[in-house]
Image (cartoon, rainbow, N blue to C red):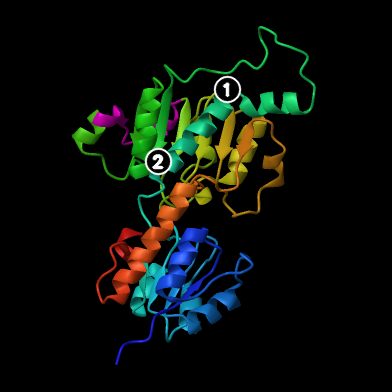
């Protein structure tokens, strides 16, 4: 007797081609409203699903996994980061966790460069002048920014995305520096032209641009704090497309207001969508709604990874992108 098809519950609206393929292959329950599920709704979804497909907006902790224990066997996360899921607790309960690594590397690195250019070339200020009709014509000293060539970028977290940022920065004529848990292989350092700094303090004090590309873990929480922000050059800028919790947002806001740092480009925030109102008011800040991976191609490829992980599990094999606690 054939096994019944897996019951899949998807927490948010995914790109149409991904949802169409899910409907072809599985018994799937899609999100009609695209509204973020409450804790209670997530637990109810776990109770009726063999496979849950959550996103970064869905925090799944140990208590929720305990309450939803029973039918759920796989959490096929739509996204690379899994710090919103208690992976250790899931493993303890026999629930596999998968993610979608690698597919948004180039997209996120592109966004890092977009934020760097926006800050250093004062693009938002120029746009505001045009849209508010206050521009009266060209002037020799108006909207002067800085060229990227000849300046130094420091990359905190030299994984896939950090290395992609390094390649782009080098193409712009920048010198590349990095701090990482482990030093990279010499071949990768040679390819990216990157100089390793064992001391994060020493690196941040010497670079003109600091790019945050490390995951959020207990050891990286507030890694960029008030003390390290004080070490940065007053004309330096900081860009974060990784996880908001890596930066002490209140300290960053104070530093920007005081002129201790020249600017910040943020695509992620310490408290999710609850943005510090003082941060919104600053003219030397570019704020984006977590759109670093938001390309049509990237989001469809993320869905294809989810589909492959579910299909492989359904066939009785280990999913290719399985996450274990030691990886988090």
Quick one: 322 or 311, which is closer to the camera?
311
Part of the protein shown in magenta: 191-207
Marks 1 and 2, how far apart in space? 22 Å
Where's residue 104, x and y in %?
Answer: 41, 47
Where's residue 140, x and y in %?
Answer: 66, 6
Sequence-earlier tag: 1 or 2: 2
| Badge 2 element | helix
Where's residue 172, x and y in %?
Answer: 41, 22
* Relative height, residue 120 to residue 315 (above, below): above
In the image, 110: left or right of 252? left
The residue under the point 34% across, 44% down is: 160
The residue under the point 71% across, 42% down is: 278
Judging by the rendered image, the residue that carries numbered circle 1 is 121
Q: Classify residue 32 by image quadrant.
A: bottom right
Quick one: 87 or 10, which is closer to the camera?
10
Where's residue 211, x and y in %?
Answer: 45, 36
Judging by the rendered image, the residue that carries numbered circle 2 is 106
């Amino acid at each position: 007797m054939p096994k019944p098809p897996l019951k899949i519950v998807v927490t948010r609206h995914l790109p149409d081609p991904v949802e169409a393929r899910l409907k072809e292959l599985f018994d799937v329950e899609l999100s009609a409203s695209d509204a973020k599920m409450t804790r209670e709704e997530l637990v109810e979804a776990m109770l009726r699903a063999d496979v849950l497909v959550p996103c970064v907006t869905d925090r799944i902790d140990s208590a929720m996994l305990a309450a939803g224990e029973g039918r759920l066997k796989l959490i096929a996360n739509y996204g690379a980061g899994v710090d919103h899921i208690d992976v250790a607790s899931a493993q303890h309960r026999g629930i596999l966790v998968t993610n979608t690594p690698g597919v948004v590397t180039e997209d996120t690195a592109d966004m890092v460069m977009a934020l760097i250019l926006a800050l250093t070339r004062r693009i938002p200020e120029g746009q505001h002048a045009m849209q508010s009709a206050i521009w009266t014509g060209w002037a020799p000293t108006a909207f002067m920014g800085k060229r990227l060539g000849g300046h130094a970028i420091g990359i905190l977290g030299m994984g896939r995305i950090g290395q992609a940022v390094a390649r782009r920065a080098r193409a712009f004529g920048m010198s590349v520096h990095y701090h990482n848990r482990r030093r990279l292989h010499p071949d990768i350092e040679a390819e990216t032209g990157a100089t390793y700094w064992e001391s994060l303090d020493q690196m941040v004090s010497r670079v003109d641009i600091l790019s945050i590309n490390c995951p959020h873990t207990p050891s990286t929480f507030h890694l960029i704090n008030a003390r390290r922000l004080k070490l940065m050059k007053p004309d330096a800028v900081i860009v974060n497309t990784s996880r908001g919790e890596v930066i002490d947002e209140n300290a960053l806001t104070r530093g920007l207001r005081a002129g201790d740092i020249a600017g910040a480009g943020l695509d992620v925030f310490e408290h999710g969508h609850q943005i510090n109102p003082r941060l919104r008011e600053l003219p030397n800040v570019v704020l984006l709604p977590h759109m670093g991976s938001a390309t049509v191609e990237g989001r469809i490829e993320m869905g294809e990874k989810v589909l492959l992980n579910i299909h492989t599990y359904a066939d009785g094999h280990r999913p290719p992108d399985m996450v274990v606690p030691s990886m988090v």
